[in-house]
Amino acid sequence: MSQKWIQIADTHYYFKSDRLNWIVARRTKAKDSSSFPDGWKFVDYTYHSTLSNAFKRAFDETVRLSDYQSIDDLLNITEKTYMMLRKQLDRDFDRNPVAV
């Protein structure tokens, strides 16, 4: 089980696991920074039974929220996002293997 949040590359998405789920959360600036020492808080928690589903959630939203102007832009953003997420996950799980 991962006890710490793993950031997905340069996005505002973080992964964490518990005994039953993969948890994806988005990090955003806190309006009340006195309650959050670093000025950030986690919001929009989603729970997934597989890492694949959690990955798809973060990937889909990252692509949807990008500011593409054409189908070529969309394809380039899709490829860039996939490579960025995959590289980050490979790096984090090599450092922090998940017990199976």
Image: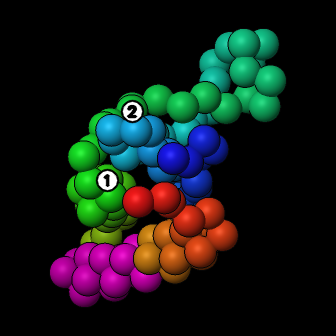
With respect to residue 96, does 91 lie above or below?
below
Residue 45: mark: 2
Residue 72 pos. (x, y %): 25, 86
Q: Amino acid at mark 2?
A: Tyr
Magenta segment main secondary structure: helix
Highlighted magenta segment, given as a residue range: 70-84
Residue under the image location 52 percent in, 77 percent down: 90
Q: Please state which of residues 66 and 3 is positioned toward the viewer in this rendering.
A: 3
Q: Amino acid at mark 1?
A: Ala
Q: Please state which of residues 74 and 98 is positioned toward the viewer in this rendering.
A: 98
With respect to residue 9, does 17 lie above or below?
above
Q: Which quarter of the rendering shows the C terminus?
A: bottom left
Q: Residue 32 sits in which quadrant?
A: top right
The answer to whether residue 9 of the structure is visible from this angle is no
- Report helix, strand or loop for mark 1: helix
Residue 33 pos. (x, y %): 74, 19
For label 1, the residue is 54
Q: Residue 95 sits in which quadrant?
A: bottom right
Residue 69 pos. (x, y %): 28, 72
Residue 86 colored magenta? Answer: no
Q: CA distance from mark 1 to mark 2?
A: 11 Å
Whether the residues at callouts 1 and 2 have beta carbons within 8 Å, the answer is no
- Report helix, strand or loop for mark 2: strand
Residue under the image location 47 percent in, 29 percent down: 43
Residue 83 pos. (x, y %): 43, 82
Residue under the image location 61 percent in, 29 percent down: 41
